[in-house]
Amino acid sequence: MSHKCHSLLVGRNGRLVAHLASVSADLADGHQIPEHAHPENQLLFASKGVMTVRTKQGIWVVPPLRAVWIPANIPHSVGTSGQVSMRTLYFWPELCKELPRKCFVMNVSPLLKELILHACGYAKLNKTVPVERRIVEIIVDQLKGVGSIPLQLPHPSDSRSMRVVRALMANPADERTLAKLCKDCGASTRTIQRLFLEETKLPFGKWRQQFRLLRAMELLASGEKVTSAALEAGYRSPSAFISMFRKQLGITPMQYFKSETG
């Protein structure tokens, strides 16, 4: 059951009091924010640590110096891996009409990072105040140019394919073939293959690869070594994980997580 949050931008009289609001929080490893929704668009930024955002549509993993865009009124929950410094901006929906009406993970440029941190020095920003209007407009302008990065895992919606998903989430290192998973979940292999392709736009094998990659990333953020994170996430060897990580993100896991201090 999701909780509907009150608007941070509209007063009790129903009038707009700000165009952008911020919330900052330092969260412990394993902290869970239950499912809720905001009437504003939300930019969730990790200046340290990894956050995992879950919706009915899928999972988005947000590593250091990345952010996830969450459109208004989408129910979502947030979990942390490692100590997380969370910085969140809430936008009046009219400000960001060009951005997608779905969640996506984005790279945060050094300029956008500084703008987010600067905006978090204000509880609220109102475009009627000239200095605040300039900050809001530069942030929105920066957001228009960002591209998404492949750190999301779309969920199928059919109950048969979700049984397969739940089995894998309970044990990412599960080595059962798709045929064996389907048999144990009471569905035909052909049906599950079709459902994954239709509902997630990924073949089952690619979906499983992405799931293991994101799970290993969460484990690394929680302090696991590369070897244990790789094996627990279902990779046969650390080198297989490192190879897949480099293929998806262009650098090794060590380089990636080191970049959070850069």
Image: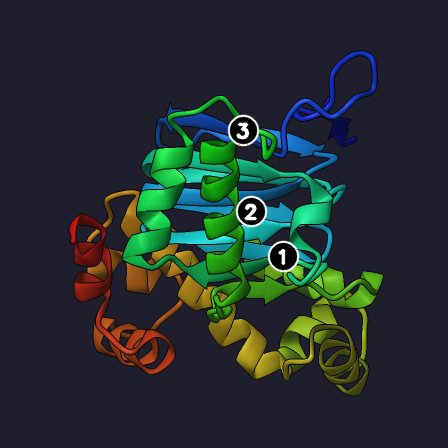
**Earlier residue among tags 3 and 2:** 2
Contact (Cβ within 8 Å) of mark 2 with mark 1: yes
Q: Quadrant of the C terminus?
A: bottom left
Q: Is residue 63 visible?
A: no
Foreground mark, 3 or 2, reads: 3
Pointer 1 residue = 103
Callout 2 crowding tier (Cα within 10 Å): few <14, some 14–19, many ≥20: many
Q: Secondary structure at mark 2?
A: strand
Residue 250 figure quarter: bottom left
The tag on residue 57 is none
- Residue hosting label 2: 53
Q: Residue furthest bottom?
A: 190
Q: Position of residue 119 (x, y in %)?
A: 42, 34
Does the residue at mark 1 contact the one at mark 3 (Cβ under 8 Å)? no
Q: In 3D space, how far apart are the residues under numbered discs 3 and 2 (Cα atoms)?
A: 33 Å
Percent x, y of residue 30: 41, 32
Name the amino acid, label 2. Val
For the N terminus, give its image quadrant.
Answer: top right
Could you tell me which residue is drawn at 43 percent across and 57 percent down?
A: 215
Q: Which residue is mark 3?
A: 129
